[in-house]
Amino acid sequence: MTDAPGLDRLVALSLVLFALGMIGVLWRRNLLLILMSLQLMMAAGQLAFVAFGRAWAGVVDSVSRGGSDGQVVALAALVVGAAQIVVGLAIVIAAFRNRGSLDVEQARAMRW
Amino acid sequence: MSGFDLAFALCALFSVGGALLVVGGRRTPLVNAIGLVIAMAGVAGACGLAGAPLIGLLQLLVSAAVAMVLLLVTLALVGTGGATLPELSASALVVRGASAIAVVALVGLMMIHGLPAVPAGLAAPDGLADIRDLGRGLFGHDMIVAAAAGFVLLVAIIGSVALVARSPE
C-alpha cells in the first residue's frame, strides 16, 4: 500500500461513525432512529471505501484504476443507502399504521 | 497545523457531533434527523478531503434529501393523530435547523471553492483526473454498477409505493 498520511485518520473517523451507528441500532427502540443509525453506518462504510480506494490506487493494477474503484463502490453504496431509506421509511409508515407505534419491542408477532 | 488537518478536524467534529445527536437525542426525531444531516455533511467533507469531491457532493445532496423525507415522514406520522411531538420550542428547532443548514453550506462552499491540498499518499496518481476517471469508469468497465444502481432505485421506489399504498388492516 502507498504511504498515506491521511488514511489512518479517515479510517479512524469511519470506525467511530460505524460504532456510533451500531450503538444506535442496538440501543434505540424507535424504528425511525434505527433507520437513521443504519444510514450513519452506510456513510461510514462509504468513507472507508473512498479512503482505501485512494490509498491503494495504482498498487494493484488489475483491481485499482487510479483510485476510482473505491469511488465506484462508494457510489453504489450511496444508491443502496438511498434505496434503503426509501423502503425503510415505507416500512415505518406501514408499521405505524398497523400497530400505532414505532417501538420495535412491541413487534413480537414473529418472535419464537 | 496544515489546511488539510484543520479541514479534517472540522469535518470530524461535524461527523461525530452529528452522530452523537442521532444516537443520543431523545426529545424528538426531528432533532435526530438534523443530527444525521450534520453527520452526513461531515462525511461528505471527509470524502472530499480523501480526493473524492464528486462522492462528497452527492452525499451532500442525499443528506438534504434524507432530511426533507424524514421531516415529511415525521410530520405525516404526527398528522395521523397517533403520534405527538414532544415539547420542543419552535425557536430551539429553528436554531438546530439553521445550524444544520450552516454546516451543509460550509462543507459545500469548502468543496466548491477548493479543498486543501491532499497529502501525498492520498493524492491521485499523475495523469489521472478524479471525476473524469470516475466518469470513464462508470460508463466503461463499471457500467454494470451504474445500471444495477438505477435498477435497485427503481425497485425500491416501486416497492415503497406498494407498501404505503396498501390500506391498513
Image (cartoon, rainbow, N blue to C red):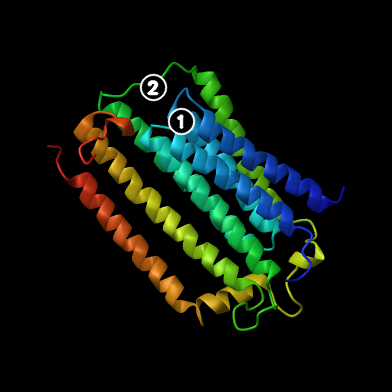
Kindly identify which chain the residue marked by label 2 belongs to: B
Relative to residue B77, is residue B86 depicted above or below? above
Q: Which of marks 2 and 1 is nearer the N terminus?
A: 1
Name the residue: 55% across, 55% down: A45
Q: Horizontal and vertical percent for residue A41? A: 51, 48
Name the residue: 49% across, 17% down: B89
Name the residue: 56% across, 40% down: A20
Q: Residue B85 carries which label?
A: 2
Q: Horizontal and vertical percent for residue A90? A: 29, 45
Within 10 Å of disc 1 (Cα), the crowding (few <14, some 14-19, many 20+) is: many
Within 10 Å of disc 2 (Cα), the crowding (few <14, some 14-19, many 20+) is: few
Q: Residue B30 carries which label?
A: 1
Kindly identify which chain the residue marked by label 1 belongs to: B
Tag 1: amino acid: Leu
Tally of numbered discs: 2
Quadrant location of residue B100?
Answer: top right
